[in-house]
Amino acid sequence: MEYLKISWLHHFEDEPVFLYSEIDALRFENRKIEIYHDGSFGIANSNFHFGGTALSDVVMPDIEDISEDKQFIPELISQAEFELIWNQYYYFLS
């Protein structure tokens, strides 16, 4: 698995500013969290989705390709960091 945090530099109120993805060996998303300017969020995995967030149905580009677009700042994060964020938002739904 690969864990990715993407900061999206923009001024669109209806688009997330942080995207967290768990990416499998084939580069498909398993889990995703999107966080918006106002603190609202969306979350998704293969069993559910919330807040308009859904898993991508296309292969995720690698970090070098994502960073070519200067509005995106991607970084690899640890599984522990991803799990912390995931549990924080997933718990909110419970």
Image (tube, helix red, strand yellow):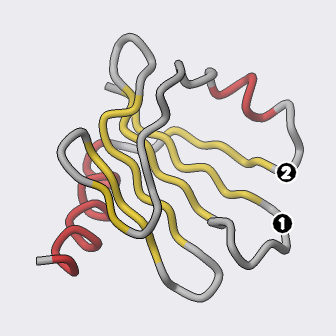
Label placed on residue 41? none
Numbered circle sitting on residue 71: 2
Q: Which of the two residues, 19 or 48, is positioned nearer the viewer here?
A: 48
- Please state the horizontal and vertical placement of residue 5, each as a whole percent of the image: 53, 49
Q: CA distance from mark 1 to mark 2?
A: 7 Å
Q: Measuring 53% from the left and 22% from the top, which residue is drawn there?
A: 58
Residue count near mark 1 (Cα–Cα under 10 Å), binned few <14, some 14–19, many ≥20: few
In the image, 33: left or right of 91?
Answer: right
- At 65% from the left and 43% from the top, the residue drawn is 74
Q: Which residue is mark 1?
A: 10
Check if mark 1's residue and mark 2's residue have beta carbons within 8 Å. Answer: yes
Residue 90, by quadrant, is bottom left
Q: Secondary structure at mark 1?
A: loop
Quadrant (top left/top right/bottom left/bottom right) for the N terminus: top left
Q: Residue at x 33, y 52 (%)?
A: 44
Q: Earlier in the sequence, mark 1 or mark 2?
A: 1
Extreme-bottom residue of the structure: 38
Residue type at the position of mark 1 = His
Left or right of 26 on screen, residue 1: left
Q: Secondary structure at mark 2?
A: loop
> From this viewpoint, which residue is outermost toward the top?
26
- The image quarter containing residue 24 is top left
